[in-house]
Amino acid sequence: MSVTGWDDTESYTLRGAGPRGSGDEVARPGGSSLLTRVILMIVGCTLLVGLIAMGVSSVLVGRQQRDALTHRATLVGTLQASAMGQAVWEFDTRAVEAMIRGLMAEDPAVRSVKVWAATGGRGGHGEPLVELDRPAGRAELATVERQIVMSGSNGERTMVGLLRMTYSLEEAESATLTALAPMAGLVIFSLLAVIGMISVLLNRLVLAPLARLTRSAGAIAAGDYRVRLRNTRADEIGQLTVAFNHMAETVHDYTERLEQRVAERTEELRQSNEQLAVVNRQVMDSIQYASLLQSAILPDEREMARHLDGVCVLWRPRDVVGGDFHIFRELEDGRFLIGVADCSGHGVPGAFMTMTVSAILDHVLSETPDSDPAAILGRLNRMVRAALARGRDNPRFDNGLDIGLCLVRPDRGDLLFAGGRIGLHIVDPGTDKVGEVKGDPQSLGYRRSDIGHRFTTHRVELAPGRSFYLTTDGFLDQAGGARGFGFGNRRFSTMLLEHDAIPMAERRTAFAQALAEHQGERAQRDDITLVGFTVSPALAAVSAADASSSHPVHP
């Protein structure tokens, strides 16, 4: 076991564990370590304390050195004053000057010496007897004054002059620096020793365990949840290690349970998706087959073309199947019925409605020998409503249809039109206007539909080159353009006029292209059915034509 109480192995993993995360990946590039920051803090604090100690010591030592130098100056002054007594009494300037020069030569701290005689007006305020000076320098100066006295034969002491010496304290300052140099070295050595000891202990006791914890945490972050740390310490680091191991164990157990649950849920979802795929395939197969059934009730465009000069059919359910269908029934004497119907609903419900309405329409046609469109619509209205009567108790169940139906009579050179909320559009060659014969504002089969309503029959002459169009509202209401507006009647009329010169068989592609350009990326919102046709009157009918181009006819 190491000094830290940690095992020499930094960390260990359970058997079968993956590679541990690298601790090098945990540290951010360019970031300082905790040890560096702690050392910098210790150095700063130690330097501050050392500087304060050196400052205080400098003041104390400097004061002591100045006091010692001043005391020495006082002693020197006293001795010199005693030695000069006889020479000053005799005014022997040479002897006094010699003694002063000898003093200044022996003691470099002396900067100036002045001697006054006490007689003849020569005191401390007159002209000195002797004065010697040398440069004082920039150091602080101290002045010492001593009376020059002589002792008589009777022991009486007489003042004969005054001695004034000026001492430089530069020696004291130099002595202070010399005395502090060992102390500064000791402080620096102590600083380095303290930093070294604290760094080693801090690194081994705190930073190394924290580094191992960091690397282990990085391994867990990298996905290795089996990492554990050995611990034999009872201090805060030991408690942190215990908490880390507990956390790692909890994360490992939770992850294993979570992975197991995810695997179970994934398997359940896979099985559910397989079941849904089977069901979806069955449903789509059924819908595709329903589309075949719905297509079977729609008239063959080639059969329609045999009775018409030109025909185009654009049938586009919103889903695979839909609620729109078109009608073509061949009658006697070369006559035929042609029309479009828009049943309620889309998709499968709409397709059921088309099958129901188509069957009812076949029954109505079998009971309406004159095939008058208005009579057909009136009977169809009543029978659809009766057929759906069982669902009337449900307020959400309300179904019916809109329809436009034409009885084309080439032998008489006209057609009879009746409509329920679907009109007949007419385009003559060489014109710039689209005519419209509006259907009655009455739907068929709904609760709100008037069961006794008598639909209006409109008679329109057939003419060479005249085109007729029937369309459900899915075409006109299709949203598109920059602002999402519907296709609209104006754009629809413009489209019919622009393509009136091309053959009718080619107009289907042109109409589909115009609709696609308007629709753009927007979804189709309703079933779309458009039937266009041209038919010429029989020759006998042309010579006998005597009716107006379009007016109501009531049977």
Image (cartoon, rainbow, N blue to C red):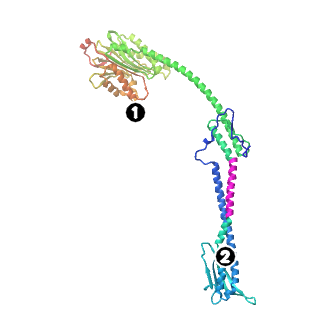
Say if the magenta span includes residue 203.
Answer: yes
Camera-nearest residue between 486 and 126: 126
The residue that appears at 26% across and 16% down in the rendered structure is: 547
Main SS of the magenta part reads helix
Tag in front: 2 or 1: 2
Where is residue 147 drawn, in percent x and y? 68, 83
Q: Is residue 301 left or right of residue 43?
A: left
Distance (Cα) linking label 2 and label 1? 110 Å
Judge by depth and name the residue closer to the eye, 125 or 72: 72
User: Residue furthest toward the top?
Assistant: 332
Q: Residue at x 33, y 26 (%)?
A: 495
Determine crowd level at label 2: few under 14, some 14-19, many 20+ residues with C-alpha closer than 10 A. few
Looking at the picture, which amino acid does disc 1 mark?
A: Arg
Q: Is residue 386 visible?
A: no
Vertically, is 153 above or below 400? below
Classify residue 200 as left or right of residue 280: right
Q: Callout 2: helix, strand or loop? A: loop
Give the position of the N terminus as an image quadrant.
top right
Image quarter of residue 61: bottom right
Q: Which mark is residue 107?
A: 2
Front one among 471 and 43: 43
Q: Indicate the position of residue 417 as horizontal and vertical percent values.
A: 33, 18
Q: Neighbour class for label 1 at 10 Å: few (<14), some, many (≥20)?
A: few
Q: Which residue is mark 1?
A: 483
Q: Give the magenta range.
A: 181-205
Which element type, helix, strand or loop, lies under badge 1? loop
* Residue found at x 68% / y 66%: 179
Percent position of residue 72, x then y: 69, 75
Lower position in the chain sequence, tag 2 or tag 1: 2
Which amino acid type is marked by label 2? Asp
- In this image, 325 relative to 228: left or right? left
